[in-house]
Image: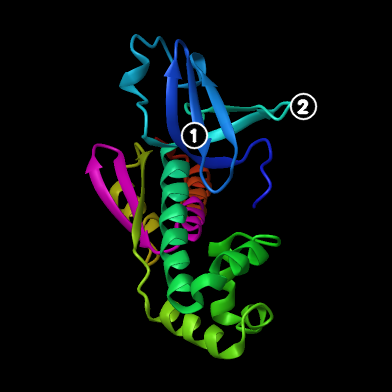
Amino acid sequence: MEKLEEGDLVLCIVEKIEGTMVFVKIEGTEKEGSIITSEIAPGRIRNIRDYVVPKKKIVCKILKIGDNGNIYLSLRRVSLKERKEILEKYDNEKKMVSILKSILKEKTEKVIEEIKKENSLVEFLEEAKTNPKILEKIIEKENSERILLILNSQKKKKSIIKKEFFLKTTNPNGMTLIKNMLNTNEAEIRYLAAGKYSIKIESSDLKKADNKIQEILKNIENQSKKKGFEFSVK
């Protein structure tokens, strides 16, 4: 079982709503947590069931773990990007558990428990694709090779990271300068409206895609400062 810490993002299942409190079960653990109304969503909440209902899957951030073990959570402090990443990770883990069960049968739970002592299941098996030895330390070589064969044959689902930004100038040669500034083969950049643009990357690795977009936008910002352009990210 992975150790929970303050600041962690966790997938939860809503168990019940009592008054202004929401009680959830934290997936992958035997633990429960609670969310107060002010941590459900920003602003005034007229009906808490507009945001959460029993059996619904939600991604929360751990705000505090009390001395008595109570776990206090927040729903509103989780960004759309973070929510997407956690749901994708959970979906990938379910697929990987299914693959392990198809090969290891009754040994599956013990192997997963061993893996999770050091790392998450998804991260461990992703690393094992390029470093099979770490899996062979836990599973006999024949089964390890069978598992990796299945994992490597699967195509990763691609996701899209997209942001909007503004770029303006009063320079009479501005359009040509902007066109040159936005010329890149690493992302798709499109003109939307006066001074408004979008940047998009499609990738199977959300983290790397987001880092690349941040890098490109930082480069555009630096060039904008040098040329005296107006630049901002939505």
Range covered by the magenta-colored residues:
188-214
Quick check: 182 left or right of 1?
Answer: left
Residue 164 x/y as whole percent: 35, 41
Tag 1's secondary structure? loop
Q: In what quadrant of the picture does the C terminus appear?
A: top left
- Judging by the rendered image, the residue that carries numbered circle 2 is 67
Q: How many marks?
A: 2
Residue 179 x/y as whole percent: 32, 55
Residue 59 x/y as whole percent: 46, 38
Q: Which of the pair 219/223 is nearer the observer?
A: 219
- Judging by the rendered image, the residue that carries numbered circle 1 is 78
Can residue 173 be seen at all in this image of the molecule?
no
Amino acid on which disc 2 is placed: Asp
Q: Dividing the picture into quarters, in which one does residue 4 lie?
A: top right
Q: What residue is drawn where x is 48% and y is 58%?
A: 212
3D distance between C-alphas at marks 2 and 1 = 24 Å
Can residue 169 be seen at all in this image of the molecule?
yes
**Residue count near mark 1 (Cα–Cα under 10 Å), binned few <14, some 14–19, many ≥20:** some
User: Would residue 200 be counted in the magenta stretch?
Assistant: yes
